[in-house]
Image (cartoon, helix red, strand yellow):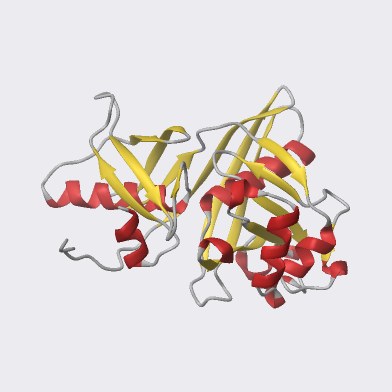
C-alpha cells in the first residue's frame, strides 16, 4: 500500500478493506507518499463518495451514514444527496475531541511559509498544534499575505529540528479571515508539509476540522454551533470549498464536522508486478 501511494503521488491515498466489526461499513487505511496516517479529512469524503457511486453502478443504495474504521477511531461519514437521490458529496465527523499541544514562535512559522513575521497574526491565538485526529500547526495570517506564502524547505527542516511539532510531519496550516466573505468563503486556507512530500495540499479536511474546533474553543458561546466555509487550493489552480462546523456544549467543543461536494476525476486498473 505504501508503494502504491508513493506511485500515485497524491497527498493521501486510501485503501478500503473489510471491517473488523461487521456492524461497520469498512476499514480504511490512509497513506501519504511516505507513511501511513491515522486519519484524514478529504480522503474520507472522497472515499465515501466513491463507494456510493460503486454501489449505484451495481444497483444498490448505501445508507445515509457510512462507518469507517481508522487508526484514530471510528469515523462516521454522512452522504450528501440531491433530491433525486444522487450522491454529490459527504460530511464526516472527526473521530477525536480537540487537543492542543505546543505553541510555536510566530517568527518560526513566518520563515517556514516565506512571509514577514508581521504577517502572522497573534491577537486571537499564537501558532499552535491542534488536532481532532491528526495534528497540524495552525496559524492565522493577514488576508493580504496568504496568497504570497511559499513553503521554504530549509526553514521547515530547521523548525522540525527545534520543535518536533505535528508528530514529525511538520505540517503547517495557515488561514486568513476574508472580510465580507470575499471569494465566497469565510476563511482562506493553505497547508504545507514539504518534509512529508506535500509542498502544498489543495484540500485538507483534517486540518480545517482542527481549525474550526480551535476557533470554536476560543470564540464561540458556551452552547452553540459555529459553521464556516473554507476556500483552499486557489494558488494551486485547484480551488476546493470545504464546509466545516463545530458544536460547543457546556463550554467544550463536542462535535466537529467537515464536508463538501465531490466530482469524479478518473478511474482505472492498477497492475501489481
Occupied quadrant, residue 79: top left
Image-quadrant location for residue 122: bottom right
The structure residue drawn at horizontal position 72% and vertical position 63%, both measured from the top left corner, is 158
Which quadrant, please, contains the C terminus? bottom left
Give how far across and how far down residue 174 sits, in percent. 69, 60
In depth, the one of 190 and 150 nearer the eye is 150
Q: Is residue 6 left or right of residue 237?
A: left
What residue do we see at 78% from left, 73% from top? 115
Tell me where residue 118 appears, x and y as whole percent.
88, 68
* Vertical side of 120 occupied by 29: above or below: above
Q: From where the camera sits, is residue 123 visible?
A: yes
Check the image and name the residue furthest to the left. Answer: 58
The answer, for residue 142, to whether it is visible in the render is no
The image position of residue 200, as x and y in percent, is 55, 68
Residue at 54%, 48% (x, y): give it.
Answer: 206
Q: How many marks?
A: 0
Q: On screen, 214 above or below 177?
A: above
Looking at the picture, tell me which residue is in the foreground, 141 or 136. 136
Percent x, y for residue 259?
48, 49
Q: Vertical placement of 185 versus 17: above or below? A: below
Horizontal side of residue 86 vs 132, given as left or right: left
Q: Is residue 26 above or below residue 267?
A: above
Amino acid at each position: 500500500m505504501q508503494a502504491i501511494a508513493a506511485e500515485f503521488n497524491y497527498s493521501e491515498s486510501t485503501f478500503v478493506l473489510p471491517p473488523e466489526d461487521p456492524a461497520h461499513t469498512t476499514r480504511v487505511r490512509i497513506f501519504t507518499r511516505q507513511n501511513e496516517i491515522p486519519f484524514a479529512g478529504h480522503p474520507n469524503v472522497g472515499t465515501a463518495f466513491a463507494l456510493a457511486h460503486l454501489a449505484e453502478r451495481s444497483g444498490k443504495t448505501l445508507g445515509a451514514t457510512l462507518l469507517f474504521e481508522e487508526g484514530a477511531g471510528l469515523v462516521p461519514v454522512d452522504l450528501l444527496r440531491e433530491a433525486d437521490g444522487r450522491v454529490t458529496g459527504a460530511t464526516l465527523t472527526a473521530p477525536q475531541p480537540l487537543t492542543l499541544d505546543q505553541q510555536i514562535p510566530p517568527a518560526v512559522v513566518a520563515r517556514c511559509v516565506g512571509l514577514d513575521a508581521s504577517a502572522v497574526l497573534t491577537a486571537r491565538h499564537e501558532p499552535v498544534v491542534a488536532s481532532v485526529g491528526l495534528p497540524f500547526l495552525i496559524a492565522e495570517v493577514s488576508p493580504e499575505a496568504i496568497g504570497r506564502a511559499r513553503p521554504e524547505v530549509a526553514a521547515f527542516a530547521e523548525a522540525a529540528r527545534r520543535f518536533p511539532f505535528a508528530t514529525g510531519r511538520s505540517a503547517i496550516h495557515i488561514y486568513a479571515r476574508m472580510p465580507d466573505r470575499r471569494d465566497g468563503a469565510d476563511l482562506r486556507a493553505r497547508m504545507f508539509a514539504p518534509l512529508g512530500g506535500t509542498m502544498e495540499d489543495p484540500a485538507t479536511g483534517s486540518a480545517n476540522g482542527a481549525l474550526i474546533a480551535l476557533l470554536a474553543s476560543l470564540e464561540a458561546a458556551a452552547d452553540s454551533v459555529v459553521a464556516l466555509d473554507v476556500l483552499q487550493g486557489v494558488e494551486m489552480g485547484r480551488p476546493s470549498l470545504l464546509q466545516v462546523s463545530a458544536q460547543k456544549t457546556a463550554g467544550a467543543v463536542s462535535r466537529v464536522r467537515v464536508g463538501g461536494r465531490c466530482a469524479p476525476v478518473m478511474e482505472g486498473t492498477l497492475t501489481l508486478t
